[in-house]
Image (cartoon, helix red, strand yellow):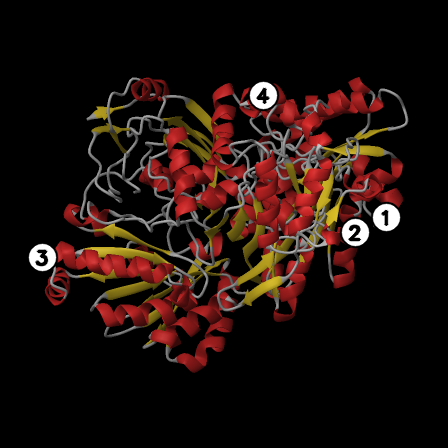
Amino acid sequence: MEMPEPRPEILANKAGLIARLQSVLSRDAVIEDPAETQAYECDALVAYKCAPLAVVLPSSTEEVAAVLRICNDMGIPVVPRGSGTSLAGGALPTADCVILGIARMNDVLETDYDNRIIRVQSGRTNLSVTGAVEEEDFFYAPDPSSQLACAIAGNIAMNSGGAHCLKYGVTTNNLLGVTMVMMDGTVIELGGAHLDAGGLDLLGLICGSEGQLGVVTEATLRILAKPEGARPVLMGFDSNEVAGACVSDIIKAGVLPVAIEFMDRPCIRATEAFAGAGYPDCEALLIVEVEGSDAEIDEQLALILKIARRHSPVELRESRSAEESARIWLGRKSAFGAMGQINDYMCLDGTIPVSQLPFVLRRIAEMSGEYGLDVGNVFHAGDGNMHPLILYDANKPGDLEKCEALGAEILKLCVEVGGCLTGEHGVGIEKRDLMTTQFTHDDLDIQMAVKDVFDPKWLLNPAKVFPLDVSGPRRAA
Amino acid sequence: MDVIETEATLAERLRDAQGPIRVLGGGTRSIGRPVQGEALSVAGLSGVVDYEPGALTLVVKAGTPLQQIEQTLAAEGQRLAFEPMDHRGILGVDGTPTIGGVVAGNVSGPRRIAVGACRDFLLGVRFVDGAGRIVKNGGRVMKNVTGYDLVRLMAGSHGTLGVVSEISLKVLPTPETVATLTLHGADGERALAAMTRAITSPFEVTGAAHVPGPDPAVHLRLEGFPGSVEYRVQQLKFRLSDLGEITVETLPERNVELWRRIRDVEALQSAYALWRVSMKPGAVYSGLLPALEQWAQCDTLMDWAGGQCWIALSEDEAVSLAEAHGIEDAAGGAAWLHRNLQEAVADRQINQGGGGHATLIKGPDALRATVSVFQPAPAPVATLAAGLRQRFDPQGILNPGLMN
């Protein structure tokens, strides 16, 4: 992965930078010792590592502003970091950057049930937002797999999704307002507790901008009343095509499940060996979950099961208790861990039109054969967001490169069939160099023009999103 | 008027433009400061490009009539769930509303509180910027975080950043059954309490509106499968029983009619000037409405559980305002109220720290030309917006001044 050369004058003036940072932050909030900065050398995309020049851990919006003013003044690149769970290398440092970690800012600032909002500092973890309101039977809907660890700041940066977004949407649909610090230290507020923008929808633009337009320090989020109950049903099919057709029929029938999860045979076998959830040994498996009161759930599941039976399932398992529900979800929730148990893996995130599912799965299987690397598929079928897991051996020379090449081929396939490179993980550095397969020069140019407006010196989260040769002239300017 | 038939022609036309252009779809939503410029209509860019009912996705050209889209979807038992408002009634115009106009104004309806706004249902757009460059952003899949999100930026930008040529949308199934609970005699805090209880319940209320007047009422809509709607009607009725008399409407056509009237703000059609205020519901009831009472006699209608407040000023009242404050004419009287509303919405005492905006939706040209139709943004945010306009439309030819 090509990264820009660190600027020697920045490296040479580390002491000057540290002194200025220490003048605005408490002593323990500035980390400069290489033994300690190493802890920030990568995020969850562990294949790439680079220790930053320094790390700062501010405690307030004012401190964030002070840090950014200094870095802007000195021309130092800044990499904002939530919890470091990005699978796309969204928080990968450069050697001449300051990591701005938001982890100490995790307070709940306001909960207002009547108006269905919570305002939090952005370092708060996703799951602990729900944790703050669940006693009153409320929840925060977006639920990325990493929700135990990932920060709201990172969710906003990547516009994170989750298993339940078929019904509840992704981060951008649940984000009402932010307090954001611009690279020059200006603090702005976008949105609020109300439902739409009074002028241009800059909030919508910020969400998913991968920390390249500003540093979000506070967020106002929509909280929702918890449904009375939820229940999953598990279905096994003897082909991916049939499972795909079943998904489409369920959606067409007017039921809107909260989740439709799909696992293919390689993935089912791996999770069975790992978690022993009692999944059937079949080609494809669906977990469909619906919500409501008991009677409402019965009504919806009856319809779903009727549709499923038309597709001759090899297995239909309806949950009768909380325990059975947990067992149905167990395998799905441990799928990534299970795959990791077998091998190193790379998790892709392309999205495709749902109708292309059978074709894409068949092509992935063929490519997997050609490259000699196993691929398991576990994904959100209702919205076409695929997560092919490519297994490789990090200790085997050349295997990572082969895995990346296969990953790139799969993502190109997603784009070819009318989909996109990333559905919920973000571009980061991982998909950066593939951007030109999805976008034309003009498509990318206008996105970069947005960056010019918000961060004219291109200091925020350098070397992400845009291919380096495409962004080169702007970064040099 | 220049009627464009293809995206390529549109691009050429904008590339070669010599002066300001007034962008139109069906011309039924003339919101914003009046624009001087040559009219350019995208109504000729029309038709369904792709529709996959099983994937809940629809791709259409921007000039496609909304009615055609609704019919196409209805044939498959689906709909645009964000329930876009029809502005023809309140603006007193004819014409054919297009999907492009809906997107340009981020136009939504009562269901916004449950499912999201127009911008939440947009999967992708193609547009031509002010330099004549064809740009695509987003796509036609449900989840997409590839690159910056210009889709939401385009929604509600009123054609000032680019001219949208093609739109991908998420659609949803139309539920089998609908019912509306009406709480009679509920006004003020009691109306707010009813709506708040309803939307903070687990019963997925898809409409919560308060219609004041001599016979005030709160309407609450439930949709879904028959058994489920019946169950939730009973539950909700029970939870609201201490607030007054409740009746339930289950006839489909009456429900459609009731919510169409609320969606299109029909009760306030005769207004001389009409504002749409967006704030959190609590701030509307305890901050804005008491302040408004001090200033003028206005009719109001609250949607989105109180989060969207329509304020109508009659011509007579505008004249009295003008007289009372020593201003020349009715437009001046309305302008006085306009400034008060926008200041109130920006006041943290009134918005309770939650922000908001007051937008003038309807008013004579004389009024719209002299006030800031859209809520003025604080300086740093206004600078960002101006910077974006400068990049997307370097010559300043697209609906210039419309959002200023």
Looking at the rendered structure, whether the residues under marks 2 and 1 are on a common chain is answered as yes
Asked whether residue A408 appears in the rendered view, the answer is yes
Residue at 9 percent across and 57 percent down: it is B328
Separation of marks 2 and 1 at Cα, in angstroms: 7 Å
The amino acid type found where label 3 is placed reads: Glu
Marked residue nearer the N-terminal end (4 or 2)? 2
Marked residue nearer the N-terminal end (4 or 1)? 1
Looking at the rendered structure, whether the residues under marks 1 and 3 are on a common chain is answered as no
From the viewer's perspective, tell me whether residue B345 is left or right of residue A24.
left
Residue pointed to by mark 2? A330
Give SS at disc 3.
loop
From the viewer's perspective, tell me whether residue B348 is left or right of residue A433.
left
User: Which residue reaches farthest bottom?
Assistant: B242
The amino acid type found where label 1 is placed reads: Ala
The chain ID associated with circle 2 is A
> Would you call the spot at circle 1 few (<14 residues within 10 Å), some (14-19), or many (20 or more)?
some
Residue pointed to by mark 1? A275
Q: Where, by quadrant of the figure, is residue A43 drawn? A: top right
The chain ID associated with circle 1 is A
Q: Which numbered marker is on residue B328? A: 3
Looking at the image, is mark 1 or mark 3 nearer the viewer?
3
Asked whether residue B249 appears in the rendered view, the answer is no
Separation of marks 4 and 1 at Cα, in angstroms: 47 Å
**x and y percent of residue A64 in the render?**
61, 49
Q: Nearer the viewer, residue B172 or A458?
A: A458
Looking at the rendered structure, whether the residues under marks 4 and 1 are on a common chain is answered as yes
Looking at the rendered structure, whether the residues under marks 4 and 2 are on a common chain is answered as yes
Q: Are marks 2 and 1 in contact (CB under 8 Å)?
A: yes
Residue pointed to by mark 4? A472
Residue at 44 percent across and 39 percent down: it is B153
The chain ID associated with circle 3 is B
The amino acid type found where label 4 is placed reads: Gly
